[in-house]
Amino acid sequence: MSANILIIDDDEILAGLLELTLELEGYTVSTAPDGDEGLARVRGERFDLILLDLVMPKMDGIKFLRLLNESGFHRPPVMIVSSATGTELTDQHRALGVVALARKPVEPAQLVQRVAKLLASEGSR
């Protein structure tokens, strides 16, 4: 069965590129332009991984993570994909459910490799 991935990013071009890249690898991919719509998608569908931007209108990535944790919905692992992040996970990231970070611009082949590794490690838990 293919993994179901949600991309939450207000950059339509980048989100579309990530979506196409992951779909070509056989993943089922949905997108949301901001945290509000991302929460609505998580409420209605089960995802195996979320790729999340931090800087978005309406609701930023950190607020999305906090509300997701408080919601009681299934909480999939989250990979932050943002130009507003470093490269090292912090305790705050981990507490919010973040399992990996990728700094924009992200190389598509590297993203595919990291997504596959994350999904494999989550599946073995």
Image (cartoon, grey):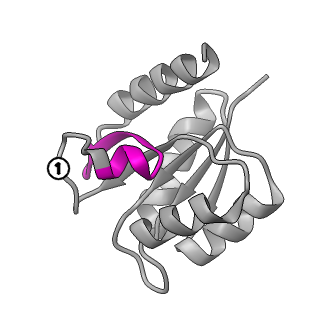
Circle 1 SS class: loop
Q: Up-down: is 54 above or below 114?
A: below
Q: Nearer the viewer, residue 16 or 41?
A: 41
- Give how far across and how far down residue 16 sits, in percent: 52, 57
Residue at 60% x, 32% y is 24
Q: Is residue 118 on the magenta stretch?
A: no
In the rendered view, does 8 fall on the left or right side of 103?
Answer: right
The residue segment tinted magenta is: 92-105
Taking the image as shown, residue 88 lies to the left or right of residue 80, namely left
Q: From the top left corner, tell me how far across and down residue 89 is, in percent.
A: 26, 41
| Image quadrant occupied by the N terminus | top right
Quadrant for the C terminus in the image: top right
Residue at x 38%, y 50% (from the top left corner): 80
Outermost residue, bottom side: 58
State the residue position of label 1. 86
Identify the image quadrant of residue 27.
top right
Could you say where residue 100 lies in the image, as x and y percent from the top left? 36, 38
Q: Nearer the viewer, residue 15 or 95?
A: 95
Verify whether residue 98 appears in magenta.
yes
Residue 62 in the figure: left or right of residue 36: left
How packed is label 1: few (under 14 Cα within 10 Å), some, or many (20 or more)?
A: few
- 121 in relation to 92, above or below: above
Identified by mark 1, the residue type is Gly
Camera-side residue: 22 or 61?
A: 61
Which residue shows up at 60% across the image and 77% down it? 36
